[in-house]
Image: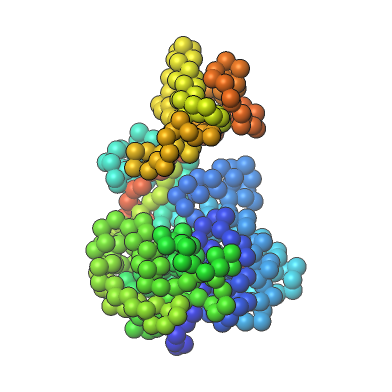
Amino acid sequence: MKAPIRIASGQGFWGDWQRAPIMQASLGPIDYLVMDYLAEVTMSIMQKQKLRSSSLGYARDFPEVVAELLPLWKEKRFKIITNAGGVNPEACRARIMEIAREQGMTDLRVGVVEGDDLLPRLDDLLARGIKLDNMETGEPFETIRDRIVSANVYFGAFPIVEALKQGADIVITGRTTDTGLTLAPMIYEFGWTEEDWNLLAAGTVAGHINECGAQATGGNFTDWQTVPDLAHIGFPIIEAYPDGSFIVTKHEGTGGLVTEATVKEQLVYEIGDPTSYITPECVADFTSIQVRQEGRDRVRVWGVQGQPPTPFYKVSASYAAGWKAASTLVYSWPDAAEKARAAARILKTRLEDLGLQFDEFRYELIGLKALAEDAAPIFCDEKDLNEVMLRVAVRAQDRKAIEAFGKEVAPLILTGPSGVTGFAGGRPKPSEVIAYWPALIPKTEATPRVVVTSLGVEEERP
C-alpha cells in the first residue's frame, strides 16, 4: 500500500482545456490522472454520433490527449481513468490501442467498463414491470418512451477498481459517476471495502472536489480578481491517505490558488440535500466535512461521515423534446433599448399572424439586465445606452414553425426600427431540443462488465 497517493484532475467536462492533462503529467509527480468528460446532455450527443457511425459515440478529444500523454506514461507509469467512453467505450478503446501500437507501447493495458447502456433493454425492462418514471416529477416513462435518445446507468467506482486489479493502465468507462473516477484509486490502493462507508464517503468528497477541474483551484471563482495567473491555472490534485483524509493542492509554479474558499465553493456545487449526497457506493454527509488551510495551496479535508448506499442506480435518460432556434440583432443609439423591444414585438406579431404554435417565445436585451433582469443594477439611463443586442429564441414541437421564425428575422432590418446591424451567419437553423429524464433502477437490473485488453489479449470479468 502506497500512501499518500496523488490523484490529479485533468478535465472537468468535454471541451475543457486540453493542455491541462499534459501539465498535470509533466509538471510534477502523480499516481493517477482522472478526466471527466460527461454531462447529462453529452450522452445524447454521443448517442446520435454512434447512430451515424459505429466508430463514434465517445469523446474524440481523449485519444488526442492520450497520444501526447503516452511518452510521459512510459516514463512515469501513472494510471489514467476517464469516462470518455461515452456510449461507445469499445470504439474509444480501439482508437487508444491503435495509438499505442503506432507509438510502440506494446505493454499498455486498457480496461473498459461496459453495461451502463440501457437503450437496447428498455422494452424488456418495462415489460417486466421495471418502472423508469421521472424521479423528480413522477411522470410515467411511457409518456416519452417513443422519443428516447439515450438511457444510461450511473455505475460507480468498484467496476473501475476491478479494472485496476486486472492491471489496466488506462480505464475507460461509459456513464460513471463523476466522483467515482477519483474514489476508485483510493479503494484500490488502500483496500477499502464496500462496508467502509465513512471512507467511501471521504473518497466521494475528494471526487466531488476533483470532478470539475480548475473550478477547485480558482477557476469560475467568486473572488476571481484575487486568483493569480489564470492563463496558466493549475488543476487540482488530491493527496489521499488511507484514513480518508486528503489534501487538495496543485503543482508548484502553476497559476490559480487552493484555499478554503475555492474548495468550499466547489463543495457546494451541484448538490441538493447536503446531508444526503447519494452515490452508488454510499450516502455522504457534506455537513460533516472539515476543511482547513495547511499552507500555501494546501487545504486539508477530513472527518467525512457516510451511510450505506441505496438499492438503486440512477439512470440518466434523454429524449427528443422539439426544436429551437435563436438569432440576434444589434440596435444603436438613440433609443437603442426601445428599438430592440419594438423589434421583438413586431417579430412576435408576425409569427402570430402566420398561425404558428410555439412552446416558448423569449427575448432579452444583452447589455440591459439580460442575466438577472430587475436584480441587475443600471448605471445610466437606458436612453443613454450606445447600443443593445436583441436576442430572440423560440421553441416548438413543429420544425416548420422554427423554420418560419428563421425567415422572419432578417426582414426586420428594412421593415423595423432604424439603426440595426449585427445580423450575421444567415437565417438561424432549427436545432433539436434534447430534454433530461432522471430515473432510478434496482441495482440487480444493471451489471457492469469489465474488459481489459493488451494489444490482442482480452480478459473479461463481470
13 displayed left or right of 424: left
Q: Is residue 428 above or below residue 25?
A: above
In front of the other: 411 or 47: 411
Residue at the image point whose x is 33% and y is 58% from the top: 271
Residue at the image point whose x is 54% and y is 77% from the top: 251
Residue at the image point whose x is 43% and y is 27% from the top: 361
Quadrant of the drawing holding the N terminus: bottom left
Q: Mark yes or no: residue 126 visible.
A: no
In front of the other: 163 or 204: 204
Quadrant of the drawing holding the C terminus: bottom left
How many discs mark residues in the rendered view?
0
In front of the other: 318 or 303: 303
453 displayed left or right of 213: right
The scheme the figure's colours follow is: rainbow
Image-quadrant location for residue 360: top left
Residue 454 picture location, percent across and down: 64, 72
In front of the other: 375 or 173: 375
Residue at the image point whose x is 59% and y is 46% from the top: 50
Residue 34 picture location, percent across and down: 51, 69
Residue 160 picture location, percent across and down: 47, 69
Q: Is residue 362 above or below residue 243?
A: above
Residue 376 picture location, percent across and down: 37, 43
Q: Mark yes or no: residue 346 visible.
A: yes
